[in-house]
Amino acid sequence: MPRSLDGLLMAPIADETTQVPGQVGSATRFDYHERDGQVWATYQGGDITRGYLVGTREDDRVDFRYVQLTRDGATASGHCLSRVVELPDGRIRLEETWEWESRAGSGTSVVEEIRP
């Protein structure tokens, strides 16, 4: 099983959407935490003023819900399933399939660990 997500700072490297464009962009940063099978994170940057996600992890799978506030004052929420992959250089990648629950739209995205 890939290592823990706890304490990782992650950024998007790919985003493919259908129906409605996603609002997470290259300036968005995710601050992940993990303990006893529970995963949570805060995120912001780009169009996102404030975002939260919470879910569970089993082996290399993470299942979470997210909610966010954008710069224009809109809120949105959705569901995401992610596969945790350990890269050859030891960093973590999340390969994600997501779907909005508060509006139409779905897609895939990839976020990777950023090292200082």
Image (cartoon, grey):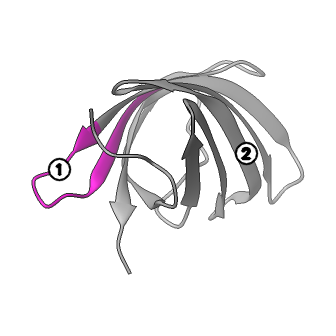
Majority secondary structure of the magenta segment? strand
The label shown at residue 52 is 2
> Residue at position x 17%, y 50% from top?
87
Q: Is residue 19 visible?
A: no
Task: Point out the image quarter for the C terminus.
Answer: bottom left
The label shown at residue 67 is none
State the residue lying farthest toward the left. Answer: 88
Whole-percent x, y for residue 24 in the image: 57, 50
Would you say 22 lies left or right of 14 here? right
* Element type at mark 1: loop
- Neighbours of disc 1 within 10 Å: few (<14), some (14-19), many (20+): few
- Neighbours of disc 2 within 10 Å: few (<14), some (14-19), many (20+): some
Q: Earlier in the sequence, mark 2 or mark 1?
A: 2
Task: Point out the image quarter for the N terminus.
Answer: top left
Would you say 36 lies left or right of 26 here? right
* Quarter of image, res 101: top right
Q: Which segment is the magenta one?
A: 85-97
Q: Amino acid at mark 1?
A: Leu
* Quarter of image, res 114: bottom left
From the viewer's side, name the closer residue of 83 and 104. 83
From the viewer's side, name the closer residue of 88 and 81. 88
97 vs 26: above or below: above
Whole-percent x, y for residue 99 in the image: 58, 21
* Element type at mark 2: strand
Whole-percent x, y for residue 59 in the image: 36, 24
From the viewer's side, name the closer residue of 40 and 114. 40
Would you say 27 lies left or right of 15 here? right
The label shown at residue 87 is 1
Q: Amino acid at mark 2?
A: Tyr
State the residue lying farthest toward the bottom. Answer: 116
Within the magenta stretch, is there residue 82?
no
Would you say 101 lies left or right of 90 here? right
